Image (cartoon, rainbow, N blue to C red):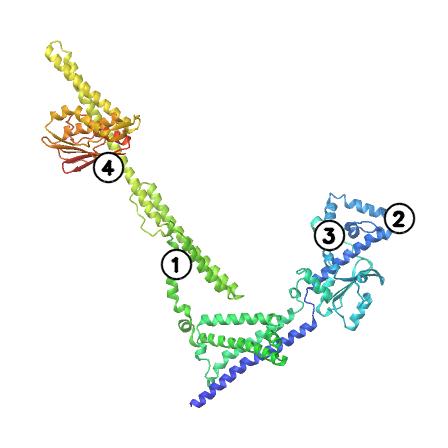
Amino acid sequence: MDTKLKNYRKLTCIIIGIIILLPSLAMMILRPHYIRQQQEQDTFPYSYRDISRFLVEATYVLHAEEVQGENNTSLTPYDIFLSQSLPAESASDEEEPEEKSEKESLDTEDSFNEEDVAGVAFEAIESQYDNWYNDFSYFRSYLEYEVLSENDVIDSNRDSRGASSLSNARALSQLNNNGQYGDYAFIAFIEYGKNGNVISTSFLTHERNNASQVLNEIAKENPIEDIQEEYDFNKSFQNPKNKTYCFAMTQDAMSAFMDTYPGIIEMSTDYGFGYANSSTDLLIVFMTLLAAVAIAALLLPFIKVLHTGEEKIFSAPLEIVCFIGCCAFGISVSIASDPNTLNRQAIYSVLTSLGAPQGLSQGIQYIWGLMGWIAVFALCYWTVSCLRAVFTMGPMEYLRKRVITYRIWPWMRSTALKIYNSLLHINLTDNTNRVLLKIVLINFIILGFISMLWFWGIGALVIYSAVLFYLLQKYLKRIQEQYQLLLEATNELAKGNLNGTIPEDLGIFEPFRDEIDKIQTGFKKAVDEEVKSTKMKTDLITNVSHDLKTPLTAIITYVDLLKKEDLSEEEREKYIGILDQKANRLKVLIEDLFEVSKATSKAITLNIVDVDIVSLLRQVKLELQDKIDATDLIFRWQLPEEKIILPLDSQRTYRVFENLIVNITKYAMPHSRAYITMENTENHVKIIMKNISATELNFNPNEITERFVRGDASRNTEGSGLGLAIAKSFTELQGGRLEILTDADLFTVEITFLK
């Protein structure tokens, strides 16, 4: 049984080998033979349409030169090609060349009086003729031409070119009758009748390729049709009359011309001449053989005894099959469609150059080519056999087992989502070069893969562009949604909602979340400050009213008492003393109010001088000694012995120290100690004043320096309530800092001046 199975397997291999070998041999035999046959039929690889157009334009230029020479005048191309009659045809030999017939003069005169239309057309004809002349100037030195009128040669350049193999157009026609053209690349005739109509055109060398038909079509075209349509010009173009133009060019002249002016004449395959037909035929033959191999690969497994179609070699993944199949198909189609591809026989040339026999070199070259075609058809058989599993396994089963993309799809999807999400969460505050580099690299990889697909890359590019459009559309839509969320948050903020939150993810706008939080915090702080300021204004009005009203009421009261006539002298002096006291208090209150107002608005002009701050503080101590002694407080002074010079306003600094020491005498606990120290460092000087408060310190230390704020809420103590406010304002105006610190009942003031 095993032996029988092995025999069937050998038979299967033989059959598959024959299926692959036969079309390979067919291509090896047919392709060189067919190309060789076409090359023998046509050795002129250039466009007959371009050549024909050059030759027709040459007849116009030669005709114009002939007319100008006969009339011994410089007639314009307008006169030659658009006038109904020429001086050469109507004038006698004795007439002056400048004289014209009455009819011609009228025609010419009329042509220039039609609202400048003829004038514009004149310029256009001149420009057109210049183009013809320039084109013919390329050809003139390489082209042999003769102009015949009633079988007489009236113009030729053969003598100047030293041509000896042919003497005139009749000899060229004789060559055509013999079917031998010597070394000529082409020989062409254009014959005009007595009315300027094209009687005949012919390419003697290439009649079988319809070259004469192309020449005839171009010769019968109206060369100024565009000018007539553009300028609404009615005159008709006049072809040469009763003339035959013969043109010829040798193979050497053609090669020299193409080397000198490359690109002037297109290759003939652009217009269906030359190898175009052979290319199409070869491609059809190749596609037919390829289809035969594919059909065999599909049908052969139905022969059960052969046991083929299920081999491991035919179980390759779809992506590998498609890639290899497309590459092989693209290369083979390019070889089959272009006869010049792989036609140089490089192996043969190398081996013969090394001295190998020509027969051996030719055989190796042939075997090499045969192996190439075998590889092409083998890959075709393998590709179709692999894809056949789609029908035998079923699409879903094939998708699960043979498609790598399907198996790695979850990973690809998660990776794509990560990349997509990373693009949605680009931190605009960071350097985005890394993100841009990733995007460019991914795009480079995709386009690089597409570029490997040759012609099919166009389809892949279309699919890629569609997918890219979908992804970009989705990406931009998501950004728009995130931007809308950001706008909603800012609108809520603009409406005054300072507690609003953004529950959703903002993507690339996520950094703005922190900024919006900062704005909310700033607005809340500003609102709190405004509320506090409003409260302070209210308190200011209340306190000012109270503090001003108290002494003022007393003054009014005692003034009324002084008006009594029965007052004793002792009572009168007592009342006057009280009035003086209340008036002085009112004066101090008003002065302090003005001082703190000016300090707050920074309307005070400072007199900055070098001040020994140690001596200044000692002076304050000396002048306030009576008030200090009037209390039962114990002051501990710790001042440096050396001088400390600072740039300060001595008067305002004195007022700061005075207010703070007076504040201690008012609010310190009786029978307690107060500490006044001064620290001298390299960068600053700090004055620290500490005392134990007589009342509980239940106020905010940051508010105690505001205007009319006191430590005792009952406001029973003497003073304006502006002492600390004035001290802080004067300190800050001089670049210093005053801070209030509390710890239980310990009240501390720290004044810092930078050196």
Secondary structure at numbered mark 4 = loop
Establish if 543 lies above or below 741.
above
Q: Is residue 579 above or below residue 435?
A: above
The type of residue carrying mark 4 is Thr
Q: Give residue 130's mark.
A: 3
Which comes before the other along the chain, label 4 or label 2?
2
Q: Earlier in the sequence, mark 4 or mark 1?
A: 1
Q: Which of marks 1 and 3 is nearer the N terminus?
A: 3
For the residues labelled 2 and 3, the Cα–Cα distance comes to: 30 Å
Residue nearest the viewer, comparing 360 with 434: 360
Mark 4 surroundings within 10 Å by alpha-carbon count, few (fewer than 14), some (14 through 19), many (20 or more):
few
Residue highlighted by disc 1: 419
Few, some or many C-alpha atoms within 10 Å of disc 2 (few <14, some 14-19, many ≥20)?
few
Q: In which quarter of the image is the N terminus?
A: bottom left
Nearest the eye: 314 or 302 = 314
Dots 2 and 1: beta carbons under 8 Å?
no
In-front residue for pair 272/256: 256
**Which residue type carries mark 2?**
Glu
Which residue is identified by label 2?
95
User: Disc 1 and disc 3: Cα gap in Å?
Assistant: 63 Å
Residue with the mark numbered 4: 681
**Residue closest to the far front:** 642
Q: Nearer the viewer, mark 4 or mark 1?
A: 4
> At x 50% / y 61%, what residue is drawn?
462
Residue 215: image location, x then y, percent: 73, 63
Q: Distance between the residues labelled 4 and 2?
A: 125 Å
